[in-house]
Structure formats: structure tokens, C-alpha cells
Image (cartoon, coloured by chain):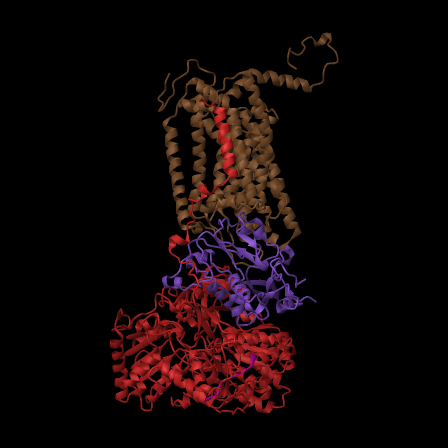
Amino acid sequence: MSKELSESGLRHRRWGMVIDLDRCTGCAACVAACKAENNVPEVSPEEAQMGRVMSWMRIARKEVAEGERASISMYPSLCQHCETAPCTWVCPVHATYKGIDGIVGQTYPRCIGCRYCMAACPYTVKVFNWSEPRWEEALREHTNPDVSLRYKGVVEKCTFCSHRLLKARDDAAVEGRDVREEEYQPACVEVCPAKAMLFGDLEDEDSRVATAARSPRGHQLLEELGTEPAVHYLDERERRV
Amino acid sequence: MRGNAVSESPRPLEESPDEALYRPIEQTGPGFYWAAAGLLAIFFFGAYQYLRQFSLGLGVTGMNQPVTWGFYIINFVFFIGISHAGTLISAILRLNQAEWRRPITRMAEVITAIVLLIGGLHPIIDLGRPDRALNIFMWGRLQSPLLWDVMSITAYLAASTVYLYVPMIPDIAKLRDRGTRPRWLYEFLSWNWQGTPRQHQVLSRAMNLLMVLVIPVAVSVHTVISYIFAMTLEAGWHSTIFGPYFVAGAIFSGIACLMVVMIVFRKVYHFEAYLKEVHFANLAKLMLVMAVVWFYLTFSEYLTGFFGQEPAELDVIMYKFTGPYAFPFWLMVFLNFIVPVAILSRKRTRTIPWILVVSLGIVVGMWLERLIIVVPSLAVPYVPFPSHPYWPSLAEISIFAAAIAAFCLGFMAFAKFFPLISIWEIEEGRESAIRETSARIASYLPDDPEPSASDEEAVPEGAK
Amino acid sequence: MAISRRQLLQFLGAAGVSISCGDNDWLLSGLQTYGSDRLGYRDLRGPGLTSFSRSVCRDCPNHCSLAVRKVDELPVGLRGTPWHPASLGALCVAGQSQMQALFDPDRLEKPLLREDAGAPGRTAEWGEALELLGTRVGGLVASGKGERIAVVDGRTPSLGTRLLESWVRSIPGAAYLSLRIETAIDQMAQEFLGGAPGGRLRFDLAHTGTLLLVGSEILELDGSPVTQMRSHGERREDPLLDHAPTLYLGPRQSPTAVQGDYWIPCQPEEEHEILLSFAEALSREHPRREAILPQYARWIPEAKDPVSFARRYSLESVARAQGLKTEVLEAAVRAIREFGPAVTLPGPSVLRRPRGFVAASAALALNLWTDGFREAGGLSWGSDPLSDLAKGLGLGARAESDPGGLLGILQPLLDIKRSPVDVLLCVETDLVHELPGRDQIARALSHIPFLACFSTHENETSRLAHVTLPTLLDLESWDLPAPAWGVPEASLQVQRPAVVPVVEARSVEDVVLDLASAGVAGPGFAPRGKNTRTLVEAAVGEIAKRGRGELVDARGRRALASVGKRSAVTSLVSGESVWVAASESGPTTPRTKATPAAAPRPGPDLAPDQLWLVPFDSAAIQSGRILNRPMMMEISGMHYGLAWESWVEIHPSDARPRRIRSGDRVKIRGQRAEISCRAIVTRAVTPRVAAIPVGFGHEAMGRVAAGKGASPLKLPNTVLDAQSGAPAWGPLPVFIERA
């Protein structure tokens, strides 16, 4: 199953991620790396206080009271790249779509900014450019050239750093082979100080990611909705016996 | 006989019994122009706010994450909802041959046409990139409920415009014959109507066809709007009741709006002779029925959600019952159910002043219902998310005000050029309806087995 | 030909249908998308030559290796480098945001001179500023009044800080003080564990059994948070250590502690109570009980007598006093017993408190005889390459730690009548913002005859300074940072400029070398280079000659060239390789050091409606030093959904009577001052405790940081730590109410 070739002669893959919450310290390095890599601008304090922070990833914190104490859990929240992504069902112009190797993509030039996909996403991971993104004069020159700068009125979200995938594929194509797992890693995975994130091909049963995803500590967010996300979380507190 | 009118058309040679219906067209007082000026000011302020939004982006609104839809979508649903009463009521009443519809239908149809245009513009106002609105046609995905919406509203707009225009042709012809200015307009639009029996036949066939077709289209419109919400997985939205719920709510709000419009214009244009207490009483009974239906559907919706105790669903419901949205929610129930039932179920209070109060309350209450459907489900996401309350900004409020002003302006503009009450149908009512209706009623009663001496005062001739 | 209306309409209908079916480009081609091209962005820069330039992040002592990605020599991004043993490719929020610091529009571009504290500064040329500095310092040196000179350094340890230190020490009587907390931990370890001078604390978190964190969290271990985070993760995966718990002891459950297994809440300033109860329970059957207890007697009178010790610090009595169930403490003791080597780590938050040293001492002492450090492959007092290096370069003897250092310099400052120093140099440290009692510190500093600041921004301290000299950021200067603290393997990494300096600034070392060459230095100051670059090259050459390690190339592969060769030196300096040194660990027997210690001073009592305001530190906020970066301001409050502002954490039982809900603004009233921030209601603090982060509330420091959030250090607190004499952070009794 995992070694089938797709039409283009490349192996069918599904890129996915495993985040080990027992290692995660909530330091938000992944959030910062994502912003830096993808040229996600900061918003003004007023806009931030209104709730318009433009982070593609965020650290979500849940506190459930248990008497005097609380059970607190924290996890990095990012686009889950669902197999059956509700955002792709509702987009009127095919600006968000299920693309290469299972990555849910976002086409900025086509998006009309209706924000239907944002309303449909149960994970609330899509972000909107409410105003024209502002950059300090000098910093604008120093943005990552591999990722396009967006403008006002379009929706954006995590792309699993697919620009890195495209580059890796180009490099691999020159050598006449497929992309190897270790050649493509999103910025967040690369930078995690606790080494809590794994990334790779979920379709390849032997890969580290697929093995980790099968762990009894593994669970997914909102599994009951049937979205089949590509992100797995490992948590001792959710261990299946 | 000429009054102190600012503008006037030449008077006809003979007066018709329905002079009152021509007066708004032929004599416009200064009040009209003052009102129009005021409404235009509001409209232009709203348009300026929109231009500002076009230039600065949607940041000028109060929307945020997670509440990504606000006033614009609420008003979209609200205005399209109001459109239902127009054509739907007019079509349903016509189909049922309810005679008391005659002075009502025109105004209802006009409401629909205007409000559809205004409502249909709102999604464009809501777009982050309105310059790319044509992408919907170039790369539209038919699987998206928004596309169904586009198709449905376009069809309804086309149908209701036609359904407004076609029955108006005889009236336009009358205006043409009276020589009312601008003559070219009436000559062009009257389509050479001469009132021959053959033309009447064609007209009634067209109207029959239209009134049957318009009903499914109208039902589909608000159903499809409800599908925008119901086809997502959000808590509070993903419910099968949404289709009927929205249609019922739309009819409800539409009737209320129609009532308000009727009462206002009755007062302003002195239509007391035509819009009598009985018309309002009948519509009020219909409104009362819709109030009960609305409450029934609302109750089912919340009971189901509450009973199931599904966490995400319950969070949204409690947000509405006891959380930040408790005040709008209970106000809505009060205005949409308690007030109408208390006031309209008693004959003594089913009078025009009370009906006006109740209808205004329902219009507000149904707007609140849209608010309560759209915002809480977004404000309470499935996943833990920092809460940011949604407050409308000046841009959103002024565009709402501009939309209402546009509605009033549209209505007033219509009233300036076309009769608000269908003159030819009133005439038809006077001339032939009474006869036809008596015959129809007689046909429901048991037939006589054979003519006998006691039945000499037999049915009039030709009454079957 | 006349057409009828019907025909006209038919024609229009047909035309409309054909248009909608046909080619519509002509209709749409006139419409352009508004956006990028009108705004002048260069969206696609086209292909460029990508190069990487390696350097080091100096925001915290972890000294993570980073690579600056440049496209056609234009820096466009930062990444970690996967082969560096301390970071393994990690780069925390602070490191990621360095580019924003580089191009901050509010950076000082020219030296500022001012007549008096509070007077407006005027920009001046470097020549004038250096002359002024040289005159003042040189005058004191020449007249033999070196004891009137003091230097406070806020940077992480490196060749540059050693150079500065040796320059200061060369002037007889002058004082040098490093404000980094790991220096304090080192000092403390020496004091209580009796290690040899020049030793460093190392421990291997990855192979630790039970981990007991006292008032600290992985992120707050200012030593090397990034490495600790990784080790913490590895520890959880080690099957032998399966279920070895992480215990967290403190009044606030920090984000890292959330992922730990047990949180033992305690009242602020009373961590030592619980630690001593553990000591009591664990020592009962310990063979060395007779030797252990007298060590505690140094500061706990009850420890002189085993019976009174047992009574006072039994698990039951301490649990009752703290409002806990005895089972909680018993479970912790069981875990420590079961999982063998346990490491107890005191954190910066503890150390900065009035009785912090007591808790820290108790924690470290617990390590000693639970054999925590040693068995975990930890406690080692070997020398590090840099000490060798410093000796080899003749930069002077390694600095004697000065536990009373801050006390010595600043305590008299709080007595505003006289000042003990005539010249105070603040190097990249913002004393007014980072020390408690902001107004008092500012007042004290304004009485110093000559205050000079080296910093990148005009901050609260430099606003009082007579001379402010702009410095270079890490990405613009040469240096040789010390190996990461707590990392088993030392590695050598050169900090080299990845970008051309954005402003006309100079590094501190270059200024010092200039002064020295002009004669402003003590005898015996003999640097091995005339600028920072040559210094670094010389140092690297020295290390390479002694060659005790392996050369690892850019891909982490072992290189064939041996270290001693010249090419290896070039390779190290140019950034191609990393030198990984074999660790010098080996257990040594600590000597007991008999020094009298003061008894812990009891803190003030709490009135019924008051709460304890407990400030906490975070490596992410770094005492506010890096809050002038927009990314930091946006991310630092992310857990609670806050951005660009600070907060105070309150327990629901305290929030309810004050009718405070999460997100409300509250006023915090101390004795003489008041601050305002948002409240977060959470059960992650102990009742009666309000926890607030330190670092926000800048009044200067650029438009990004100024005016955002509130600083608890503004509420005056003249409590001094009994052991170190340092001005202490809270806990302060305060009133909190809704604003």
C-alpha cells in the first residue's frame, strides 16, 4: 500500500506530523520559526487585542478544573491538513484545495476573502489579512524570498512549508529520484528545542512518523468529526490501554 | 383643484374612483424630498464607509478571529429573509385566491425586489477582495453552498422582478393613458397594453405560471442560505432543522416587515380606504401562526442540542442561554414569541397601532435571531481558543444604516413612479370578484338534488 | 427597418446568452487585482545565490549555534544548525527574533552625551565620546583610585566578557560584576558544595531519575534552556527512566511544569520547608545521616538535634502548614527513593527572592547526599577549555566570584547620601528596569558622578547616563562564547558577523582595547590582539594547539584534519567547523566549607485582603532585554491569548471575591506605587499568590517595548537577600482590585 506509485511515477505520500506533548515545553519556538519562515507579519497592539494576531501556529492551552487543582494541557495548534478537509468543501473559488501529497494548499491570488473556509474549519487555524500587512522599512527587504508576501483581504494558513517541499523536489528531480524524507522538514519541526516534533510520510509504514503515530499514546484532535487530520499528538494522559 | 404640489402631472379628463392611488405619483409634496434627502445622506455616509473599507481592508470592521463573520453576513441573511414575504406571500395568497390580498400584493412584491438587491450586495461588501468577485464565475465550485446561493438568489431576483413587473403592466398602461409624466417611461413599460380580453388571458396565464414557479424558487433561496451554515461542522450550525427553520423565519420576518411598510405608507399616503383593519387583522393572524411555528422550531433546535449534552454544542447553547449572548437571546424570544402571542391572539388588541408595535418588535427580534445564529457558533470554537468578543464598528453600523436607507429610498422611488396598490386588481375586485367568489363558495356547498318549489330563489344565472 | 419591442427583447436575450457562453476575456482583462504591484513590494526576487553564515546567539547562555541564510548577501532568515551539540538545530523564540533586533529603527546610531541625569541627550561623534570616557576612567586609574571604578556586565560569558573582566581586574581595586544568574548559581554551588575554584556545574538531565525543580522550570533555567528542554524530552523517552517523575515545587505552575507529573504548590518563600521535610524523610534510613544533618545546621538551628529536626520538619507537619495532603509529599519521597538518582535544581526565580538562597542551599544539599548529581554523571569540577584559554592568552586569573558583589556596589546606592563609586560602566544591562525598586535605583544611579552605558537602545538606565555608546549586536560582531552551561560536551563555536553592522556602533571589546592602547588600563593587561577579530583568531589558535577534541564539519561529519593544523584554525574561524571537546567530567569529592550563615529573615505578614505578588522569570522574556522585538511582544503572552501586554495570574478563590474574571484589567497596589495589567484566573497558582512576569513595563527601549505591560519591579521593595545581599524580587504583599 505504501509503496504504490502515483500517476506521475512518484510514490504516493501523505505528509504528516507527530507532536509529542510529553516533550513539548510550550516554549513557542515553533510559532516563532513559522512566522519567520513564512513572512507572517506582526499586527499592531490594537489589532492584537481585538483578536487579529496573524500566527499560523499558536500554543493552545486548556484548563479543566478538578476541584481545587486543574488539569492543564498545552499543545501547538496548526493546520491539521485533514484528509477530508471541511475548508476545501466550502470554498467557492477553489482557492483552498487538497494538493500535493495530502497538503491542503491555499492560493492567495485566487482567494476572494469570503472567509467561508475560516468559518468551516473546526480547528480555527486559518488566519485572515484584515489589513495590509505592515513591515518595518528595513525588515521588508529581509523577508524569506521563497514565500510570497500576502496582501490584505486573503486567507492564509500553515502549508507544512510546502515551498521547502517544492525545492526538495526540484533538487531530487535533477538527480532523477524522489524526495527523501529527511530532505524536507517544515521550519517548526526543525527548530523545536525539545525535539518534540516529527515529520514525514505517514503512508510509509516504516517511517519514524508512521511508527510514532501508531503509539498507544497517540491521539488526534477532534477525531470524532471524521476529518482525519495529518497531525498526531502523543500524550501520556491520553494513553490507550 | 390643483393643490400646492411641487411637481404635478396633467390631470385626466375623468376622475377615477381610485384617485388616492394616483396621487403619490402625480403629486409629490416637500415631505417626500426632505425624507429622500435625509435618507440619501445616510446612504452616502454608508457608501463612504464602504469606500474606506475597500481601500483599507476589512480591518475597519469589528470582525476578528474566531468571529470571522459579523454584521455583513447577519444583514445578508436578514435582508434576504425579508424578501420572502414579498413574493411568497403574494404568490401564496394569489394561489389560494384569497381576495383580501388585492391591496397587499404590489407592496409585497416591491419589498422583495428591493431587498433582494440590497441583500445580494452584502456578500460582496463582506468580501476581502471584492475586485475578484468575478472569480466566482470564472472558477466557481458548484460544490460550495455559496455558489448554490449565488444561483438561487439570481434566479429569485430574476423571477421576482418579472413577477413584479408583469402584474404591473395594466397599471402602467393606466398611467400612460392618464398622461402621467414621464410619458416615455410608461409608454415603454406598458408594452402596448390595451386591455383586450386576449391580453387579459395571456396576462393571467403568465401570472399563474409565475406564481407557481416562484414558490419553489423562493423556498430554495432561504434554504440554500441556511445551507451555508448547515453544511459546515460548527456546533450550533450543523443541524438538519436549518432549512425549514430559516424559511419559516424568513416568512415570519417578511410579513412583519410588510406590515410595517404597509402601516407607514398607509399613513403617509392616506390609503386608509384601501388598507382596512381587516387586511391587517388577517395578516396578523398569519403572523401569529408564524410566530408559533418559529417558536416550535426554535424550541426543537435547542431542546435537541441541550438534551444531547454534546460538549461543543452545549458550550454554544449556554453561551446563548446564560453567557454573553443571554440578553439578545431572551430579548429575541420575548419579541418573537411572547409579545406576538400575547397581543395578537386577542381580537381587541389586533388593531393597527398594536400591530405596528408587534411588527417592529418582530423585525428587531428576527435580526437578533440572525445575530444569535451567526456569532455564538463562531465565538465558541471546538478547540480552546482565546475569546475575543465581537463588537460592530462604525463601518458596519453605517453600512447597515445605509442598507436600510437604501431600502426606504427604493420604496419611495417606486412609490413615486408606480402605484403602490394594484389599481387594476382593485377594479377587478370591484367588478367581478364578488360575483366569482359567491359562485365559488356556492360550488362548495352541497348541490340541490332537483329543483323544487322551495328553491325558487335559485342561484343566479351564470354563477357556476 | 423598424423592429418591434418584442424583437428587440429577443435580440437582447440571445446576445446575453451568447456572451455568457462565450469568451469573456475582453470583459475581464481590464480588471487588475489591487495589491502587491501597487505597493512596491518585490514579491519575487528571482533566483539568487544562497549562502549561509554561521554565528552564535547570545541572548541566553545556551549559546545556540545559528546560521544566517543570505540570498545575494542579503540576510533573509535564521536557522539553527543541526550538528551543534548544545542545540541540535534548535532556536528558541528569542533567537528567531534576532533579525528584528538587527533592523530595529530605534537602535542608537550615534553616541549620546548628556550633562545630567534627566537632561536631554545630544548626539556626538565617537571621538568625543571616547575621549570623555577615557578622561574620566583614565584619571582615576592614574591617580590610583581604582576602587572608585565599577563595571556591571549583563552579557553571557565569552571571550569578550573575560577580556572586559581582565581589564577591570587589572586596575587595582576596580570591581567587575556579572549580572547573569548562572554566575550566581555557580557561586552558590561553590559556597555550599565546596567545589574547587574555576569549576563549573554540569549535570546530565537526560539521564536523571526523579527530577525535582524548585521554583524553576526548564524554560527558566537561565543556564541553557534549549539544551535542558531537549534533555528533558530525552529523559521521558528513556525506557529505564520510564515513569521517573518530574516534580515541580513552587507557588506557580509554569508552562513546563504543566507537562510535569506533580506540582507541589507551596507558599512563596517556603520551598525550603518542603525540601527540608524531604531531607528529613530521606535521611531517616540513610547511612550517612549523622554526617548530613550537621550540614543543615549551618542555617537551620533545629538540625543540630535530630529529634527536633524530625519534629519540626516531618512530612505531616510541613504538609499541614502548607495546606497540602501528606500523601502528596509522601509520593514525592517515594519517587525519589525508587528512581534513584534525583537531581534537584533551584531556579533563578528562587534565587532572586529574599530567602531564595535558603531554598537553593536546601536544594543543592539534597543533591549531595542523595548522590543526585554524581550518579547522574553530573557534578564535575573539571576545567573548561575557556579557562585554559584565558590562562593561555594571559588574560589574567579567572575572576573570583563575588557573592556580595551586587551588595557591595548597589546597597550603598540605595543609601542616597553618598556613592561609593565615581565611575560606573553598565555594559548591556538595564539596571533600572531589571532590579527591584525602579525609582530608588534610578535615584541612586543619578547620584553617581559619571555613569556610562553600553547598549543598543536608549533604555531606562541610559537615560540617566552621561555617555551612552551604541554597541553591536551578536550578529554583527566577533567573539568566542563560552561553552553552554550544563552541557556534558563542550563545543567551540565562533561568533562571527553575519551582516555588515547596521549602525555605526562598536563592540565593547573594541572600545576597551582602544582605551587600553591609550593607556587607560592597569599593569598586566596584555591582550593578544588589537581588535576583536584578531583576539578571536588568537584564542582559537591557542585552543587548536592544545587540541583535545575532534573537528566536526558543517554536516556533522568528523573531519580528517587534526585540530592543530593551521587549516583547522582557519576552518574554525571561518565557520566551517565546530570543535567538540571531550568532556572533562569526573567526580570529585566536595569539601565542606565552614562559613557562618545568617538565619533566614522572616518576611512581612499578609493582611487579610492582600495577596503575595510573586514575580517570575522566563528565558523567553529575558528580564525584558529582548522585548524590543515585535515577535517577542506578540508571542510572550500566547498561552493566555494575550499579545503586546503583560498579565498577573490569580487563583479563582482570590478572583471570585474581587469579582475579577480572566481578561479584566486589574490594579496592583503596593506600598507606594501602583501598576496595572490584565488578570488571568487560573488554578496554576497557589491561593493567596499572584504571579506576574518580569520584563515588561519598559518606559524606554524603543517604540515596540515602551509602554507595554507592567513591571512588578516598579513596586518598591527594599528587601535584600540575606545571603547574597542582592536586592530581592518579592514576594510583595499587595492589594489587587479590578480597574
Colour assigned to chain C in the rendering is red
**Magenta stretch: includes residue C615:** no
Q: Which residues are magenta?
A: C198-205
- What is the quadrant of the N terminus of chain C in the image? top left
* Residue nearest the observer in this picture, B445 or A11: A11
Q: Residue at x 28, y 70 (%)?
A: C118
Residue C19 is situated, as x and y percent measured from the top left of the image, at 49, 37
Q: In the figure, is residue A99 to the left or right of C74?
A: right
Rendering colour (chain A): purple
User: Quadrant where the C terminus of chain C lies?
Assistant: bottom left
Q: Is residue A90 above or below residue C105?
A: above
Can residue C200 be found in the magenta stretch? yes
- Res B26 quadrant in image: top left
C378 vs B166, nearest the viewer: B166
Is the residue B85 above or below the residue A145 in the image?
Answer: above
Chain whose colour in the figure is brown: B
Q: Residue at coordinates 43% horizontally, 52% vertically from top-left? A: B59
For the stretch drawn in magenta, the main secondary structure is loop
Q: As rendered, which of B152 and C682 lies closer to the eye?
A: B152
Q: Which residue is the extreme one toward the right?
A: B449
